[in-house]
Amino acid sequence: MTRPPKNPDHAKDPNHVRIIFVGDVVGKPGMSIVCDSVAWLREVLNADLVIVNAENAADGAGLTNAQYKKLIESGVDAITLGDHIYRKKEISSTLVSASNIVKPANFPAAAPGHDHCIVHTAGGIPVAVISLLGRVFMRPVDCPFAAVSRVLEGLAAEVRIRFCDMHAEATSDKQAMGRFLDGRVTAVLGTHTHVPTADEQILPGGTAFQCDVGMTGPYESILGRAIEPVLNTTLSFDPNSFHVATGDIRLSATWFDADPATGKAVRIERLQLREDELTSWRSSQAKT
């Protein structure tokens, strides 16, 4: 796992844009650490943009309007979602009115939300953010390959940096999308399975890729849920409420550097930040 940078090897080229994508935020523990981490991501990792998948923020399923507002106020630049997007019905109004949150582009046109958004770095560089839902072992949706092609065709030429969150169950779905978009987008990073994969790479056409960025939330858990209820139901089939766990809070993310002139990725690395590491950093900042 990639620890906080402590050497010059992690320095950012001033001519490049660094984007950090935070994986599935789970419940209150995930919300807490991601909001507290934005300053660290910007000051320590020199992030130009912070994008967050927040589809599990509301007790493990969905996102509320208040949580959306809290994420944006903490410094998050854009938000993606996934199959739980409409679990909290109230978010539909924000999906329609806000310009920094997206629905999966392969959802029906009539579904509330935008099929992409454009956010800008402090230096004014535009970045397109797209979300897609996979089809293997997922709810029935339109073709993600056709949907992303449609979105890309509509983007202005000056929007060279293009990010895609591939929210899918199967690694085959994610790898197929990465290869399909290689050279057409800057990065394809996967979410949904909550387990970070060690396959981060830059594909031959210049697209950064990883099957799954991982979960932001409690790791003393089963995919963010308390262990015992999940095991009890697995062993007995007796239904239980799978509430969000509370122990070993970590932020899982992946960052990549992009050349704004070409839109190609030049570097990609995994990141996992533990709650105690963040607390230690914040304490050191308070003393200076």
Image (spheres, helix red, strand yellow):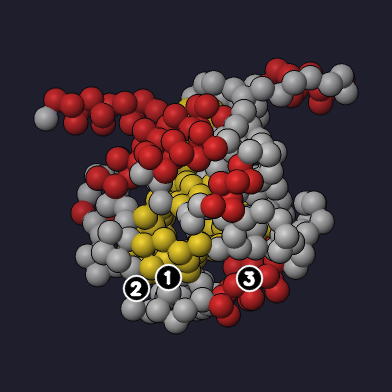
Query: Who's the residue at 58% across and 36% down the image?
Result: 64
Q: Position of residue 103 (x, y in %)?
A: 62, 55
Query: To which quarter of the image does residue 222 belong?
Result: top right
Q: Amino acid at mark 1?
A: Ile
Q: Residue furthest left?
A: 288
Whether label 1 touches label 2, CB < 8 Å = yes
Q: Is residue 144 above or below residue 183?
A: above
State the separation of the CA atoms marked 1 and 2.
Answer: 6 Å
Query: Who's the residue at 49% across and 47% down the image?
Result: 52
Other residues around mark 2 within 10 Å, as few (<14) / some (14–19) / many (≥20): some
Q: Position of residue 79 (x, y in %)?
A: 51, 50
- Of 114 and 169, nearer the camera is 114
Q: Amino acid at mark 2?
A: Pro
Q: Position of residue 141 (x, y in %)?
A: 78, 59
- Of 252 and 86, nearer the camera is 86
State the separation of the CA atoms marked 2 and 3.
Answer: 21 Å
Q: Amino acid at mark 3?
A: Val
Query: Who's the residue at 59% across and 22% down the image?
Result: 245
- Number of marks in the rendered image: 3
Reading the image, the residue beneath label 1 is 161
- Of 207 and 8, nearer the camera is 207
Whether label 2 touches label 3, CB < 8 Å = no
Q: Position of residue 201 (x, y in %)?
A: 49, 63
Reading the image, the residue beneath label 3 is 148
Where does the N terminus fall, quadrant-wise?
A: top left
- Answer with mark 1 or mark 2, whichever residue precedes in sequence: 1
- Answer with mark 2 or mark 3, whichever residue precedes in sequence: 3
Reading the image, the residue beneath label 2 is 260
> Would residue 8 be found to the left or right of residue 205 on screen?
left
